[in-house]
Image (cartoon, grey):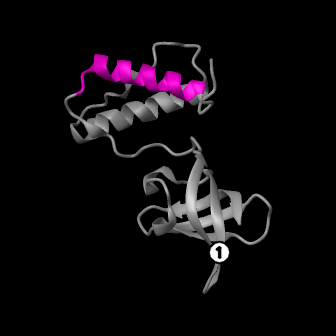
């Protein structure tokens, strides 16, 4: 049976957590081996759909697919600190009327880009961020300003 729910907690290191089904009932165990998307995308507040199974110790989710990702979690892997610099101010949005969701999304995206590559220029980061932010707005992932 396909159900929807919200991730209560998920420990990326240990690879397991729990989902609160939308229809109520007991919390459902989730394991990293049953995730459809990359495990780093799942965190507290993420909305997921899953198939309910009955495991040895109770309800268990399988084929867990991310529907909506909560913006509550900040990325922790950032290259600037490792280089002894704080680059976050360099790449903040130039628009004062940007929504909180969009500003948070932009900051997380900037951190992710800086953490992935030491060779991206500030112009390249700004161009990628603008493109991805436009896509996120069009899909309703972040609020439009």
Magenta region: 120-138
Q: Nearer the viewer, residue 33 or 7?
A: 33
Q: Quadrant of residue 79?
A: top left
Q: Position of residue 95 (x, y in %)?
A: 51, 13
Where is 128 relative to 95, above or below? below
The residue that appears at 30% across and 16% down in the rendered structure is 123
Residue 7 within the segment the image draws in magenta: no
| Left or right: 89 as drawn, with respect to 21 | left
Q: Position of residue 120 (x, y in %)?
A: 24, 26
Where is 111 relative to 89, above or below? below
Q: Quadrant of residue 68?
A: top right
The residue that appears at 51% across and 66% down in the rendered structure is 34
Q: Nearer the viewer, residue 112 or 35?
A: 35
Q: Position of residue 57 (x, y in %)?
A: 62, 85
Q: Secondary structure at mark 1?
A: strand
Q: Position of residue 62 (x, y in %)?
A: 57, 68
Residue 132 within the segment the image draws in magenta: yes
| Left or right: 60 as drawn, with respect to 73 | right
Where is 64 relative to 145, above or below? below
Residue 90 showing in the rendered view? no
Q: Quadrant of residue 118?
A: top left
Dot 1: few (<14), some (14–19), or many (≥20) neighbours within 10 Å? some
> Hey, which residue is sitting farthest front in the picture?
1
Q: Which residue in the structure is indicated by mark 1?
A: 53
């Amino acid at each position: 049976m396909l159900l929807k729910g919200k991730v209560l907690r998920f420990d990326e290191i240990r690879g397991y957590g729990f989902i609160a089904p939308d229809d109520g009932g007991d919390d459902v165990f989730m394991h990293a081996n049953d995730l459809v998307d990359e495990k780093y995308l799942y965190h507290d507040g993420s909305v997921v759909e899953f198939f309910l199974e009955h495991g040895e110790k109770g309800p268990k989710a399988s084929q867990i697919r991310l529907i909506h990702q909560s913006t509550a979690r900040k990325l922790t892997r950032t290259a600037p600190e490792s280089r002894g610099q704080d680059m976050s101010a360099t790449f903040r949005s130039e628009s004062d009327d940007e929504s909180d969701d969009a500003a948070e999304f932009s900051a997380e995206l900037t951190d992710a880009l800086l953490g992935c590559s030491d060779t991206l220029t500030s112009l390249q980061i700004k161009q990628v961020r603008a493109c991805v932010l436009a896509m996120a707005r069009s899909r309703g992932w972040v609020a439009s300003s």
